[in-house]
Image (spheres, grey):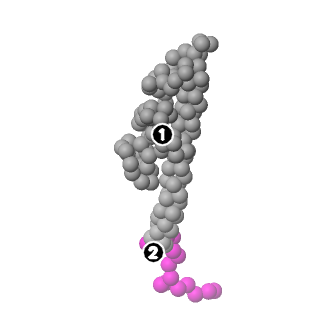
Amino acid sequence: MPKRNKNRRRAAGFTLIEILVVVLIIGLLVGLVGQNVFKALFKGQRGAAEIQIRNFGGALDLYRIENGRYPDSLEELLEEDENGEPFLDSIPLDPWNHEYFYSLEPDGKYLIISYGADGEEGGEGENADIRSDEI
């Protein structure tokens, strides 16, 4: 008959050190993956703003062809053309829920700007302006 060791206990569950190691590993993974997710999200928002500005540009060019001039405001693109259809169905907000800035330049061209995440002129990173003359 085998002898039993009364000092030996069967371990049930995890030790505190094992739990801390797992929490540390999860924290490191979340930190590394989280940064990449936010970078991808920012790239997506910037790309969406560039696409919207290009769409405005196409509608503005059609407006100029039909009317001989660019509109004074983006809202004029909601008016119907000679076929009874608007140049744009709606004026969307930029991906950060701010209105686009539109102006006519002295050289006769237009300028459309999204002021980025902060909604203010200038900035860097996600706060950088996205301009129609730069895309």
Query: For the residues marked 1 and 2, what is the alpha-carbon distance in whole angstroms?
Result: 45 Å
Q: Quadrant of residue 87?
A: top right
Is 40 a magenta residue? no
Q: Residue at x 63, y 86 (%)?
A: 1
Label 2 sits on residue? 17
Q: Position of residue 24 (x, y in %)?
A: 46, 69
Viewer-nearest of labels 1 and 2? 1
Report the quarter where the C terminus lies: top right
Residues 123 and 69: in front is 69
Residue 63 screen position, x and y as percent: 56, 23
- Of helix, strand and loop, which one carries label 2? helix
State the mark number for residue 95.
1
Callout 2, which amino acid?
Ile
Q: Position of residue 95 (x, y in %)?
A: 48, 39
| Magenta span | 1-17
Q: Amino acid at mark 1?
A: Pro
